[in-house]
Amino acid sequence: MTSDESRGGCEQPNLVYGVAVLAAGASSRMGKPKLLLPWGQSSVLGHLVRQWQTTGARQIAVVHAAAEQSVSAELDRLGFPAANRITNPKPERGMFSSIQCAAAWPGWNVSLTHWVIVLGDQPHLRRETLRQLVEFAASQPDRICQPSRHSRLRHPVVLPKAIFERLKDSREETLKQFLQTHASVAALCEMDDPGLDLDMDTPEDYAKVLRLYP
């Protein structure tokens, strides 16, 4: 498996995007790393990487906790390149710390114009939802693009280069605060994917998602 090439998908002429998969969370409510849970023929992590490869990402990087060996082992099993792994030395600081690690990482392809911040608990999103978001971002290349459902903000989020680079030095404590600070350059794409409303934080959530998206 490679993570630094497009797979046809929906690559846009004015949108060359990288993906940061956030995999450093403790998954305390799940009781085990949620990205290692089975999903289809792979794990949640493997599915997310493959999904974004086929959607057209130029580069995919995974942010993981420096001390979490199980995620590293799964990346090894998947054949995911070591060169595209970003370590978060202090994941206890929360999700935003992983995003800032991604923004500060020097290993991104210099051709990238945008970045997608991908949560580790949304393997159930339709591929068409991701393609629609990418196409929407291509039509609004200078804006932060985010899906919404029934006017509620959802994930993943697409950030243009100029704004992505601000993340590493941001004083905000959460991604939500950062996005609120930049609300004037945000564009929302209303979507009809029920999966946008679902979180996968507990064993019960996982069982529900598996029933709905076998």
Image (cartoon, rainbow, N blue to C red):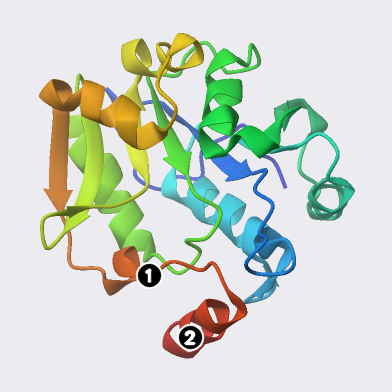
Q: Position of 182 compared to 7: left or right?
A: left
| Lower sequence index among marks 1 and 2 | 1
Q: Are marks 1 and 2 in contact (CB under 8 Å)?
A: yes
The amino acid type found where label 1 is placed reads Leu
Q: Identify the residue under disc 2.
A: 208
Q: Which residue lies at the image location 18% right of the left edge and 55% below the top edge? A: 152
Residue carrying label 1:
198
In the visual, does 117 lie left or right of 177? right
Circle 2: is it few (<14), some (14-19), or many (20+) Cα within 10 Å?
some
Numbered circles on residues, count: 2
Residue 206 at x, y percent in the picture: 56, 78
Q: How far is mark 1 from mark 2, CA to CA? A: 9 Å
- Residue 84, how many percent across, how many down? 70, 30
Tell me, for residue 179, which label it has, or none: none
Q: In this picture, is 164 found above or below 88?
A: above
Secondary structure of the residue carrying tag 2 is helix
Residue at 42% of width from left, 86% of height from top?
A: 212
Q: Is residue 179 left or right of residue 24?
A: left
On screen, residue 169 versus residue 5, left or right, reads: left
Would you identify the image quadrant in which residue 192 lies? Answer: bottom left
Q: Is residue 78 above or below residue 112?
A: below
Q: What residue type is disc 2 on?
A: Lys
Residue 212, compared with residue 185, is above or below; it is below
- Image quadrant in which you'd find residue 196: bottom left
**Which residue appears at 78% of the width and 54% of the height?**
78
* Foreground residue among 17 and 27: 27
Mark 1 secondary-structure assignment: loop
